Image (cartoon, grey):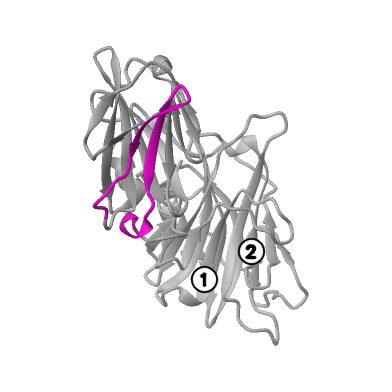
Amino acid sequence: MQTLSKGANTTLPAGPVAVTVAAAAPVDISALLVTASGTVRSDDDFVFYNQPQATGVRYRPDGVDVDPAAVEPEIERVVVTASLDGRGPATFGQLGGLRLDVAVGGAPFVAFVPDGLGPETALLCVEIYRRDAQWKVRAVGQGYADGLAGIATDYGITVDEEPQAPAQPAAPPPAPGKINLDKGRVSLQKRETVSLVKTGAPALRRVAMGLGWDPARGGRDIDLDASAITIDRRGRRSDSVWFMSKSAYDGAIAHSGDNLTGAGEGDDETIEVDLARLPDDVVAVVFTVNSFRGQKFTEVARAYCRLVDLDGRAELVRFDLTDSEPRTGVIMSVLHRAGATWEMTAIGEFHDGKTVRAMYGPAEETVAGLLR
């Protein structure tokens, strides 16, 4: 087995190709199917954990499988990428242990160990590409400091959408006299609010919002993405955490994607929030779910969100979404400041947008209605 240096390439023998990525901490793997123009044809050419297959290309948690014989003629390159998930080192320069192995027909073929990495948070690892009738592999090892979103944008993935108008005017907050946590776990209805305090107990510090869903009866699998949008004191979006940018405020908000181990298991995705570490300027965290592949929420059953105390491992609040609309995004709930404490309000309002960026405007409108 030969070792490639950065920028080097070699001809691949015939057969299915497996690219495996190993590192000292978990990384997220994806692949881009790129045409002669240097971009993808559509978002369908982005292969990752939530869209795990395209013609001739298949995602694995530790890499990507490519069947060159099956790749469509318009595709000239399959670019394999790795990005940090926000739970480990902040940059690839701090990561260590990064290695790419390429096997053909199940037999080891080449290896590549990228060097000289620094502030990068996403990396172009290797590319499998055509030259005339021959397939080759090139060691790339070039990085982006703005994460997977930077790579996706450069290759033509749609990650920026025009915000849509809210489905309906933001409703005012509930009347005074909100419930709190004194009687234990609280189930909310749409537009109900709970104060996240319990008499005599210390203030909550670390919480997780777990979001889950199932396909509608008899339906196909549906791929949704949970995200969080922070709103500042001016009522504007200040940051967001989603599958292309999994951490904000030095990890005070982190998209984990793991099932919680506490009561009521079954979350599809979770977003952890260290309330005590959020900047004072952050007045609200808006939790959304979007359908990256454009499937409608009428194909979803039993969508819910639940707030869990990460220190006590107890479920505090739950909101079950009982209705649906043929749209691609929904604002599920909002954590917002109430003086020195925090409250949670169930929202359950539908909007259009395949990624969190389309939800920025509706999120600002929702928080404005809650805090007016």
Task: Name the residue: 70% across, 62% down.
Answer: 262
Give the labeled residue for mark 1: 274
| Furthest residue toward top | 133
Name which quarter of the figure residue 125 lies in: top left
Estimate the x, y position of residue 84 in percent, counting from the top left. 40, 52
Amino acid type, mark 1: Asp
In the image, is residue 60 above or below residue 41? below
Estimate the x, y position of residue 296 in percent, counting from the top left. 56, 36
Give the labeled residue for mark 2: 307
Question: Which label was assigned to residue 57?
Answer: none
Q: Which segment is the magenta one?
A: 91-117
In the image, is residue 43 above or below residue 88? above
Asked if residue 46 is among those painted magenta in the image, a careful observer would answer no
Estimate the x, y position of residue 360 in percent, counting from the top left. 41, 54
| Quadrant placement of the N terminus | top left
Asked if residue 111 is among those painted magenta in the image, a careful observer would answer yes
In the image, is residue 167 above or below residue 221? below
Q: Is residue 171 visible?
A: no
Name which quarter of the figure residue 184 lies in: bottom right
Disc 2 on helix, strand or loop? strand
Amino acid type, mark 2: Leu
